[in-house]
């Protein structure tokens, strides 16, 4: 069905239907560079989408439940906060103890992310934990503490130290033509 406008009528805005898919795409476009630093970024996002704040949050929760969005989180710039030394600690731990040990390492305040990875030929490590500190000595101390926490369950470890800052960005979509 198409709309018909007579030439005598003044031009007016024809409302467009927002499908869940188009709303989701618009939401990603609006947030892919981060939320604005406002008192209520959810209200801003809702206004941009033409939705209520509740509907906007429901949309986000739905996309997260579907796996389209993994998480919604603040991503601090560690370097600007004074944490200029970083080390990815890698651990060879007993697979049977992985759930407990991964949670233990991930709960440490100096660990920004911790995850399990499959072992590969020539690479024995299966638990990774990123640590941040203000000096090389500090991240070495953190590694020693993690080693202590892992105890006998740890067969080997190494620390891969950052040598330069890499540009970190998430998914970027090209704008959809109107």
Image: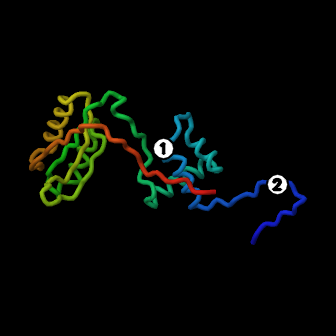
Q: Label 2: which residue?
A: 11
With 146 as the anchor, is 52 left or right in this view?
Answer: right
With 92 as the anchor, is 55 left or right in this view?
Answer: right
With 99 as the anchor, is 58 left or right in this view?
Answer: right
Q: Position of residue 1 (x, y in %)?
A: 75, 72
User: In this view of the protein, which residue sits in the foreground, 12 or 61?
Assistant: 12
With 144 as the anchor, is 37 left or right in this view?
Answer: right
User: In this view of the protein, which residue sits in the foreground, 125 or 56?
Assistant: 125
Q: Position of residue 149 (x, y in %)?
A: 16, 41
- Vertical relation: 136 (above or below) 114: above
Residue 88, picture quadrant: top left
Q: Position of residue 24 (x, y in %)?
A: 55, 56
1 or 2: mark nearer the eye: 2
> Is tag 1's residue or tag 2's residue first in the polypeptide sequence?
2
- Vertical relation: 17 (above or below) 54: below
Q: Position of residue 135 (x, y in %)?
A: 22, 28
The residue located at (73%, 57%) in the rendering is: 15
Q: Residue furthest bottom?
A: 1
3D distance between C-alphas at marks 1 and 2 = 35 Å
Q: How many marks?
A: 2
Asked whether residue 58 appears in the rendered view, the answer is no
Mark 1 crowd level (few <14, some 14–19, many ≥20, 10 Å Cα): few
- Which quadrant of the rendered structure holds the C terminus? bottom right
Q: Label 1: which residue?
A: 33
User: In this view of the protein, which residue sits in the foreground, 151 or 6?
Assistant: 6
- Vertical relation: 83 (above or below) 71: above
The residue located at (53%, 50%) in the rendering is: 29
Q: Secondary structure at mark 1?
A: loop
């Amino acid at each position: 069905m198409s709309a018909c406008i007579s030439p005598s009528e003044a031009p007016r805005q024809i409302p467009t239907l927002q499908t869940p898919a188009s709303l989701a795409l618009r939401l990603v476009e609006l947030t892919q560079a981060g939320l604005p630093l406002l008192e209520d970024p959810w209200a801003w996002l809702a206004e941009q989408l033409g939705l209520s704040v509740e509907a906007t949050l429901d949309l986000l929760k739905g996309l997260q439940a579907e796996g389209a969005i993994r998480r919604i989180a603040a991503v601090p710039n560690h370097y600007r906060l004074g944490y200029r030394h970083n080390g990815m600690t890698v651990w060879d731990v007993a697979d049977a103890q992985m759930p407990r040990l991964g949670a233990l390492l991930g709960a440490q305040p100096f660990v920004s992310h911790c995850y399990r990875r499959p072992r590969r030929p020539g690479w024995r490590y299966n638990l990774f934990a990123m640590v941040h500190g203000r000096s090389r000595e500090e991240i070495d101390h953190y590694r020693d503490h993690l080693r202590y926490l892992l105890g006998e369950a740890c067969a080997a470890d190494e620390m891969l130290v950052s040598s330069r800052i890499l540009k970190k960005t998430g998914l970027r979509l090209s704008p959809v033509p109107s």
